Image (cartoon, rainbow, N blue to C red):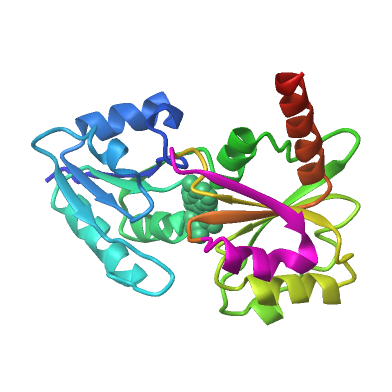
Amino acid sequence: MKTGTIYLVGAGPGDPDLLTLRAARLIESARLIVHDGLVDPAILAMAHRDARLVSVAKSRSKHTLPQDQINALLVREALAGHDVVRLKGGDPFIFGRGGEEMEAAQAAGLACEVVPGISAANGAAAASGIALTHREDASIVSFVAGQCKGLADQDWAGLAGKGRTLVIYMGVKTAPQIAEKLMADGLAPDMPLAVVENACRPEMRVLRGPLAGLPEMVERHAVKSPALIIIGTVTARADAALARVLEETVS
Ligand code: SAH
């Protein structure tokens, strides 16, 4: 019997307009879509009416399905001859466990195709007007994961500071430890940062402030996941640009 293909598809940060054409075509034609919690309902609504939609929603605190069971589900369906669209927020290979799922497919001898998506960092940058690189401000960008497990063991030294932009995924809950860690690494307490919540969605919020004020900012504005923390002088540049626009509007 012919086995199915596992497609690891990036759904981007939210807005269906930010899907690649390849992703949109696969979503529309799929008969089986296995998706996580970050995929916007508007994107799931594009699925064929006969498609089976299986949620394996994962969030920091509740794991509906552990990763090995997700891998097993994908492999089982493909071995049974079904093509599987594994739909993920952002890009499958940026904090998306896409690597693990690809390895599971390969170990089972199954065909696997990866369809890239716009990662939250790229979506948030565009939507908030924060250029992650700028000839006058930053020529290095790093993406890190800020979740609790192993945070203290991660070596971020040198990733943030002059000429550099640091983008932190999954950092809302650990904001106090993140600010502390970066300042312990020598980052100035007044280093500008931005928090972008729900980037590329109608309810997007962009907050700006100094590094030392991050924990208070997150708490006062009740910032919720999904949100990114962008650290570096490029975020202050966006402030200036925004202020100019406002001034022009007023005058
Ligand atoms: N594969 C995804 C990342 C998954 S990890 C990607 O490439 O974007 C989940 C984290 O991504 C969230 O905790 C948050 O930090 C970030 N994220 C995802 N979607 C987001 C959005 N619309 N706005 C802001 N951050 C987002």
- Residue occupying the point 42% across, 31% down: 19
- Residue occupying the point 85% across, 41% down: 139
- Residue occupying the point 70% across, 80% down: 153
Decide: is 105 above or below 233.
below
In the image, 13 versus 117, the foreground residue is 13
Decide: is 222 above or below 23.
below
Query: Is residue 93 visible in this depiction of the protein?
Result: no
Residue 141 in the figure: left or right of residue 89: right
In the image, 236 versus 157, the foreground residue is 236
The number of discs equals 0
- Residue occupying the point 76% across, 76% down: 180
Query: Is residue 84 visible in this depiction of the protein?
Result: yes
Q: Is residue 214 magenta?
A: yes
Residue 48: image location, x then y, percent:
15, 32
Residue 185 in the figure: left or right of residue 66: right
Quadrant position of residue 131: top right
Residue 150: image location, x then y, percent:
61, 79
Quadrant position of residue 136: top right
In the image, 35 versus 244, the foreground residue is 244
Residue 64 in the figure: left or right of residue 206: left
Write the start and end of the magenta stretch as one range: 202-223
Residue farthest front in this picture:
251
Residue 93: image location, x then y, percent:
51, 50
Residue 188: image location, x then y, percent:
89, 65
| Image quarter of the C terminus | top right
In the image, 68 versus 161, the foreground residue is 161
Quadrant position of residue 151: bottom right
Q: Is residue 3 magenta?
A: no
